[in-house]
Amino acid sequence: MTNVKEIQRILLRMSELLTFSGRDDWASSISHLADKADEGYSSVRPEIRQMYGGMGSLNDIVLYKDGNLLREENDEFDALRHRLHELTRG
């Protein structure tokens, strides 16, 4: 059974990190998915999976602020991204 609450928690934290680094476009999209997850796993899974493919995908995001690489935030974001991928894999 998929843990929708964990998916929501991950999405919201990812959105916070994206907002902090000025990536408001991505933050808004991911926050929207967190809200949509209330409708259930099957309503949000396809959209989450689509974010992982192609150029300019979720996998390509590196967090910067004021021209400085955010190392700790990137490490956290990467861990969240991998966990979200695991939760929506099958």
Image (cartoon, rainbow, N blue to C red):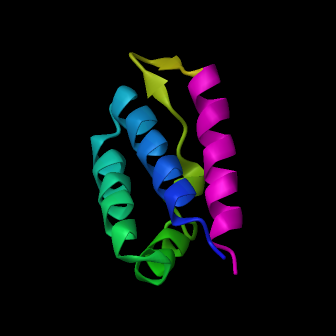
- Relative horizontal placement of residue 33, taking residue 49 as reference (left or right): left
Q: Where does residue 16 sit, x and y in percent of width and height?
A: 39, 35
63 shown above or below 5: above
Relative image position of residue 48 (x, y in whole percent): 49, 69
Decide if residue 69 is on the left or right side of residue 17.
Answer: right
- Point 49% across, 66% down: residue: 51
In the rendered image, the vertical position of residue 39 relative to residue 75, given as above or below = below
Is there any visible trace of residue 57 in the rendered image? no
Is 6 drawn above or below residue 69 in the view shown?
below
Q: Majority secondary structure of the magenta segment?
A: helix
Give coordinates of residue 73: x percent, y percent.
Answer: 57, 27
Locate the C terminus and report the quarter of the image it occupies: bottom right
- Nearer-the-camera pick, 47 or 2: 2
Residue occupying the point 55% across, 37% down: 62
- When asked about the image quadrant of residue 69, the answer is top right
Left or right: 21, with 70 as reference point: left
- Was residue 86 drawn as part of the magenta stretch in this picture? yes
Counting labels gives 0
Residue ID at (38%, 55%): 30
Q: Tell which of 55 and 61 is nearer to you.
A: 61
Quadrant of image for the N terminus: bottom right
Which residue is more in the foreground, 47 or 58? 47
**Which of the 4 quarters of the picture holds residue 83?**
bottom right
Residue 70 place in picture, x, y as percent: 55, 21
Q: Is residue 23 magenta?
A: no
The residue located at (66%, 66%) in the rendering is: 87
Q: Can residue 80 be seen?
A: yes
Which range is magenta? 71-90
Q: Image quadrant of residue 59?
A: bottom right
Work out whether residue 65 or residue 90 is closer to the camera in this orientation and state it. 90
